[in-house]
Amino acid sequence: MGCGETERGEVTRFAPVPENIVYRGVETRLLHGDLVQFVVETGPEAEAVHVERYAECAAAQYALIRGYGFARHVRTSVDKIENGWRGDAVYTISPSLPRGLKTIDAEVVAGNCAENGIPMV
């Protein structure tokens, strides 16, 4: 099982990801400064929560690639599309723990994503 973080930054366990989920890719867009958008797609076997986790994994890996250790969730929208799901998420990335309730430790989240077979950037 992997870990996620609560709105207060506390680490919690979440259910394992089903093995049959098809991850179709991540599109990353730097919006401004430290604000980054992630558009992800999965196959129809996923559920909304899997799409959200996929975007979170992309954000964690992106933060690490850029030399940052943390990210803060701004928003995520998930929509059912013709043959699967699409998620549109926005995160800020930062070198230190940002203010706010929905923060993630990029190294911890990326490790859990790898453990659960969720692809990253």
Image (cartoon, rainbow, N blue to C red):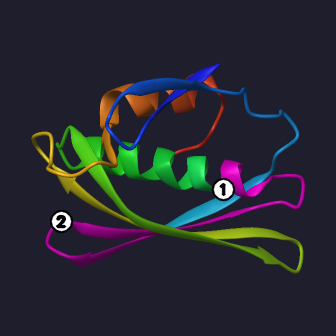
Quarter of the rendering containing residue 1:
top right
Q: Amino acid at mark 2?
A: Asp
Residue 40 in magenta stretch: yes
Confirm whether residue 121 shows in the render.
Answer: no
Q: Earlier in the sequence, mark 1 or mark 2?
A: 2
User: Does residue 12 appear left or right of residue 105 in this picture?
Assistant: right
Q: Nearer the viewer, residue 114 or 88?
A: 88
Confirm whether residue 51 shows in the render.
Answer: yes
Q: Residue 80: x percent and y percent?
A: 79, 74
**Number of callouts:** 2
How far separated are the C-alphas under marks 1 and 2? 22 Å
What residue is drawn where x is 28% and y is 48%? 101
The residue that mark 1 highlights is 51
Q: Amino acid at mark 1?
A: Val
What residue is drawn where x is 79% and y is 54%? 47
- For label 1, the SS is helix
The residue that mark 2 highlights is 34
- For label 2, the SS is loop
Q: Which residues are magenta?
A: 28-50
Quarter of the rendering containing residue 17:
top right
Q: Residue 62: x percent and y percent?
A: 34, 51
